Amino acid sequence: MAKHLLGIDHLVIAVRDLDAAWAIYEGLGFTLTQRGRHSPHMCTGNHCILFGRDYVELLGVLTPTELNKPFRALLERGEGLSGLALATDDAARGRAEVSAAGLPSGPPVTFSRPVELPEGPTEASFNVVQLRLDATLGMQVFFCQHLTRGAVWRPEWQDHANGARGLAGLTLAAGEPAALADPLVRLFGSDAVRHGNGRLEVATGSVSMHVLGPEQLALEYPAIELPAPQDLPQPVAFSIAVDDVQRTAAFLRRQGQAPVWLGQRLCLPADEACGATIEFVRAR
């Protein structure tokens, strides 16, 4: 694994309406940050769901710009998981490492967004490097270096009514999981990728990534509608660790939800969460 790759920083969920997405996820028991507005040349906005070391970002377009044109095209196809941000302590050095491994990438880009804190306004700043893996993994993959962690990881945003404690996994669907092995090995290292039985298991340095073929996906996620072959690969679900899955189930039922049990996992269908299937699992 690259020295400057530190695991998964956050997942991005593309949403068409940030206000509606905020209401949906608040109703699911998540505490969300206030509206963030990215730099004018990006003109996107977000709400974040923060945990101890990672988070989920609800990302939408505020004003169309040339830079967010690809993101708008993605939203035309539908909402859902669209990005995987990999944590790094140095985006430029991380880029050099993956370039040496044969993975193309873009130049480092610095951007920021204002944050309103009780002690006054400040800026959350980031360095990011886009990896050219969109077609390979069906989602944007990028390094994310936080330059102002104190403006993002605030304790008041990490307490969630549904018991959420952090990310526990990411699941991708692929026609042939083995076809994704090479770029994932180049990114995470040969020791991090295991394959067999129609699936890949990837140790990212923090939570696990699962790449499932159609048959395995149908077995493990019967509540998920199988994507069309031409739409593969694509991310289909993410897992959230909670202290007590039964308690989370009871909370969601009180909120009017009808989560589905898949063994000991609690699954919330994509149409209840802006196109992203969520499963809740017991924290380890």
Image (cartoon, rainbow, N blue to C red):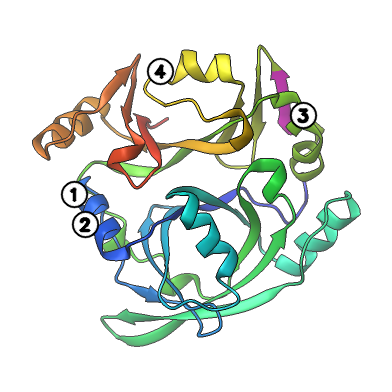
Main SS category, magenta section: strand
Q: Position of residue 119 (x, y in %)?
A: 29, 85
Q: Earlier in the sequence, mark 4 or mark 3?
A: 3
Residue named by callout 2: 23
User: Vertically, is 183 above or below 17?
Assistant: above
Q: Amino acid at mark 1?
A: Gly
Q: Amino acid at mark 4?
A: Pro
Residue named by callout 3: 179
Q: Residue at x 70, y 52 (%)?
A: 5
Q: Quick check: marks 2 and 3 in contact, CB under 8 Å?
A: no
The span from disc 4 to disc 1 (Cα, nearest Å) is 24 Å
Q: Position of residue 184 (x, y in %)?
A: 74, 38
The span from disc 1 to disc 3 (Cα, nearest Å) is 38 Å
Q: Amino acid at mark 2?
A: Ala
Q: Which residues are magenta?
A: 191-195
Q: Residue at x 40, y 85 (%)?
A: 122
The span from disc 2 to disc 1 (Cα, nearest Å) is 6 Å
Q: Quick check: marks 2 and 4 in contact, CB under 8 Å?
A: no
**In the rendered image, is residue 166 in sight?**
yes
Q: Nearer the viewer, residue 163 or 80?
A: 80
Q: Earlier in the sequence, mark 2 or mark 4?
A: 2
**In the rendered image, is residue 169 in sight?**
no
Residue named by callout 1: 27
Q: Residue at x 52, y 80 (%)?
A: 112
Residue named by callout 4: 222
User: Vertically, is 206 above or below 58?
Assistant: above
Q: Quick check: marks 2 and 1 in contact, CB under 8 Å?
A: yes
**Which quadrant is the N terminus positioned in?**
top right
Q: What is the secondary structure assignment of the residue under circle 3?
A: helix
